[in-house]
Image: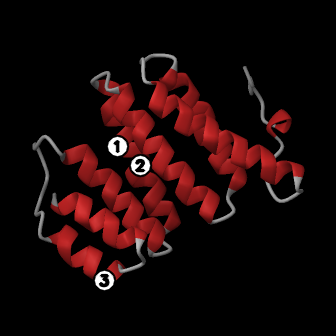
Amino acid sequence: MRNNYAVALAERGKLARARRVFGALGDPSGKDFEETYRATEGLLRYREGRIASARECYDKCRAALEKVGDFRGALISIVFQTSEEQALNHFTEAAKLIQIGESYAKRIDSRDLAQLLRDERAELEKLAADGTGVDYDMLAGTDKN
């Protein structure tokens, strides 16, 4: 519950309070929520402007989830990270994440998560059409189907 509360606080822009709540979770090493913790740390770092280290958190989270075959969890982290990249106008990075997410979506049966991913892609394509986003056709290996 504290992790969810920290995310909610971060979403509302209350970073100092989110950090305090998140810090109260302690060391997650070896616990069931270790990857969730890592993803939340990534979210907080994005919000604090620490982009490179935020990406590292999400990369480590996804790598660990992939290792155990939790592609649903990996896809959830992709959706959150894509949203952060898009908010920063890092459209090319967001598009690359969507491509990774699409590969996860093919491995699981989750219509809700697949729809979230399609929504993110549609938003990026709209921005591309406006000249502010990324052109998917410019990305190698993009398959819109």
* Label 2 close to label 1 by CB (< 8 Å): yes
* Label 3 close to label 1 by CB (< 8 Å): no
Q: Position of residue 68 (x, y in %)?
A: 27, 24
Identify residue type, mark 3.
Ala
Q: Earlier in the sequence, mark 3 or mark 1?
A: 3
Q: Position of residue 36 (x, y in %)?
A: 26, 48
Q: Earlier in the sequence, mark 3 or mark 2?
A: 3
Query: 85 left or right of 142?
Result: left
Q: Residue at x 59, y 57 (%)?
A: 85
Query: 96 left or right of 80?
Result: right
* Distance from Cα at disc 3 to Cα at disc 1: 23 Å
For residue 16, the mark is: 3
Q: Position of residue 126 (x, y in %)?
A: 80, 48
Query: 5 left or right of 40?
Result: left
Quadrant of the rendered image containing residue 26? bottom left
For residue 109, the mark is: none
Residue marked by disc 1: 61
Residue marked by disc 2: 58
Q: Helix, strand or loop at disc 2?
A: helix
